[in-house]
Image (cartoon, grey):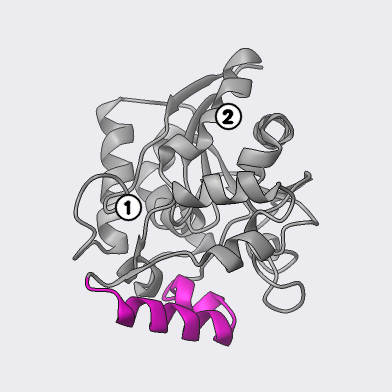
């Protein structure tokens, strides 16, 4: 079965981050219709960008493209965007795929879902910026996000990351898993330690929030879209089928 994918990226990334995965999806006969870049993470000004702006942007690009039967994928922070956008797009969606992604309840922000030491780090970094953004520290990236790559690859990928608009971490969603109205899957690797294993880990915490979700296990770090793109493409297809 051929699928039409829309790929929503995670924090610090842009739609370009999916290019290796998208190439494998297309080679397997699937359509990657959109890889949108969120407001504030392209060449535009990140100041004043909130989560609602990102959600409006995603909804708008899907509607303008007049897409239907879409498999909407969200990586990491992109799960916040999926959860808020899905009720507005449900008639155009065949499935939501959360890829190592946050699944908020109504009234929760990403800030509410990360460990206290992450909260403190985000507060510190945003406060030290002149535009209320959070830059990804290289040592965090190397140790917890892309630990399965060489130092050269880690530094190269990190150099492409953009400071992230902090309000999109602290803004709460207005809807939750019970409002989605679309079948869901959750893709996760046991080697993803961007959230520490335990009560704040990705799984089973977030898959358990999704009713009757399909869980697909894959390989690689949190940045497996760079380090294991063929495996991630395969996992997304399995999640969509």
Sequence order check: which comes first, mark 1 or mark 2? 2
Residue 95: image location, x then y, percent: 56, 38
In the picture shown, does residue 241 fall above or below 99? above
Query: Residue 122's image quarter?
Result: bottom left
For this view, does 78 lie left or right of residue 222?
Answer: left
The verdict on residue 108 being magenta is: yes
Q: Quick one: quadrant of the C terminus?
A: top right
C-beta proximity under 8 Å, tags 1 and 2: no
Q: Residue at x 78, y 44 (%)?
A: 218
The Cα atoms of the two marked residues, 1 and 2, are separated by: 24 Å
Q: Residues within 10 Å of mark 2 (few under 14, many from 20)?
A: some
Q: Disc 2 marks which residue? A: 20
Q: Position of residue 90 (x, y in %)?
A: 43, 42
- The rendered magenta stretch, by its main secondary structure, is classed as helix
Range shown magenta: 106-130
The correct choice, above or below, for 60 with respect to 38 in the image is above
Above or below, 16 against 96 in this view is: above
Q: Is residue 110 visible?
A: yes
Quick one: SS at disc 1?
A: helix
Depth check: give the residue in front, 129 or 190: 129
Please check the rendered image and state whether residue 21 is part of the magenta-colored stretch, yes or no: no
- Residue sticking out furthest to the front: 152
Find residue 20 and report its horizontal and vertical position in percent: 58, 29
Q: Residue at x 55, y 26 (%)?
A: 22
Residue 48: name its quadrant. Answer: bottom left
Q: Is residue 184 visible?
A: no
Taking the spot 40% from the left edge, 57% from the top edge, the residue there is 84
Q: Quadrant of the N terminus?
A: top right
Q: Which mark is residue 55?
A: 1
């Amino acid at each position: 079965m051929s699928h039409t994918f829309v790929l929503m990226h995670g924090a610090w990334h842009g739609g370009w981050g999916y290019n290796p995965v998208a190439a494998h999806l297309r080679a397997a006969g699937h359509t990657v219709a959109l890889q949108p870049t969120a407001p504030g993470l392209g060449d535009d000004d990140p100041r004043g960008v909130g989560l609602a702006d990102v959600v409006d942007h995603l909804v708008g690009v899907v509607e303008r493209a007049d897409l239907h039967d879409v498999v909407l994928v969200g990586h990491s922070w992109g799960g916040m965007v999926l959860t808020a956008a899905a009720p507005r797009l449900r008639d155009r969606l065949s499935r939501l795929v959360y890829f190592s992604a946050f699944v908020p309840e109504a009234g929760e922000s990403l800030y509410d879902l990360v460990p206290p030491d992450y909260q403190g780090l985000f507060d510190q970094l945003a406060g030290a910026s002149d535009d209320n953004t959070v830059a990804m520290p290289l040592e965090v990236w190397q140790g917890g996000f892309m630990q399965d790559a060489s130092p050269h690859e880690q530094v190269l990928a990190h150099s492409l990351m953009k400071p992230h608009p902090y309000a999109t971490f602290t803004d709460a969603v207005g809807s939750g898993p019970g409002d989605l109205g679309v079948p869901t899957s959750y893709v996760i690797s046991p080697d993803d330690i961007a959230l520490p294993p335990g009560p704040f880990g990705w799984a089973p915490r977030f898959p358990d929030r999704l009713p009757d979700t399909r869980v697909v296990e894959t390989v690689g770090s949190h940045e497996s879209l760079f380090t294991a793109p063929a495996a991630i493409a395969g996992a997304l297809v399995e999640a969509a089928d």
